[in-house]
Image (cartoon, helix red, strand yellow):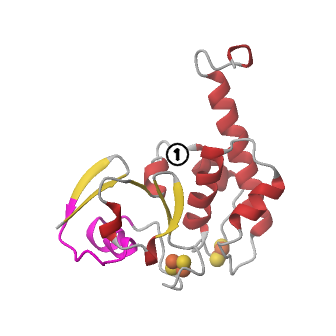
Amino acid sequence: MVRLHVNGRDHEVDALPDTPLLYVLRDHLELHAAKYGCGLGQCGSCTVLVDGQAVFSCVTPVLLLEGRKVTTVEGLGTPENPGPMQSAFIAEQAAQCGYCIPGMMMRAQALLQRNPHATDEEIRTHLQPNLCRCGTHMRILRAIRRAATMMQTADASRPGRGRAGR
Ligand code: FES
Ligand code: FES
């Protein structure tokens, strides 16, 4: 039995300790956003956050995750109330086939949580481990820039967080 904390909830999962996190997310917890691409840590379609860091869930055994916080795209918002990253990707229509998009969103989320004012160069460099076979890179970049602006605006409008309060 493995204990996991995913998207703010605790779970006990009947899985072997070396089971990749991706399989547990999809097969045990029915969280299907993270995708199986290469299974080798080479494409990024399975990217999720662990304690705020982007990781390849296809090569991360669940035994490493006890006591750590896992976040998937499902944890960024809901269809009724999407988070900034989700809203931005929808607004920019960043997906073509969509297979890479959850991984792109989570890697971008890791960057913007750490550095909400990331430059274009920093975004491009950070996103390099994630591949898009459809070639929608320019729309993905626009979506991430839009998400950054939305997050900055939301942060600035929080009580005590306006420019004068910084
Ligand atoms: S499926 Fe995990 S990196 Fe490709
Ligand atoms: S939108 Fe198809 S792989 Fe990126």
Displayed quadrant of residue 130: bottom right
As for residue 30 lying within the magenta part, the answer is yes
| Identity, as a three-letter code, of the amino acid under mark 1 | Pro
Q: Which residues are magenta?
A: 12-31
Instruction: Give percent across and percent down for residue 162.
Output: 69, 18
Q: Is residue 116 left or right of residue 41?
A: right
Instruction: Give percent across and percent down for residue 13.
Output: 21, 66
Nearest to the observer: residue 101 or residue 69: 69
Instruction: Give percent across and percent down for residue 37.
Output: 53, 82
Residue labelled with disc 1: 82
Q: Is residue 154 left or right of residue 65?
A: right
Structural crowding at the residue carrying mark 1, measured as other residues with C-alpha within 10 Å and reported as few (<14), some (14–19) or many (≥20): some
As for residue 151 lying within the magenta part, the answer is no
Nearest to the observer: residue 88 or residue 38: 38
Instruction: Give percent across and percent down for residue 23.
Output: 35, 76
Does label 1 point to a residue whose CB lies under 8 Å from ligand 2?
Answer: no
Q: Quadrant of the C terminus?
A: top right
Q: Is residue 60 left or right of residue 153?
A: left
Q: Is residue 30 left or right of residue 161?
A: left
Secondary structure under tag 1 reads: loop
Q: Quadrant of ligand 2?
A: bottom right
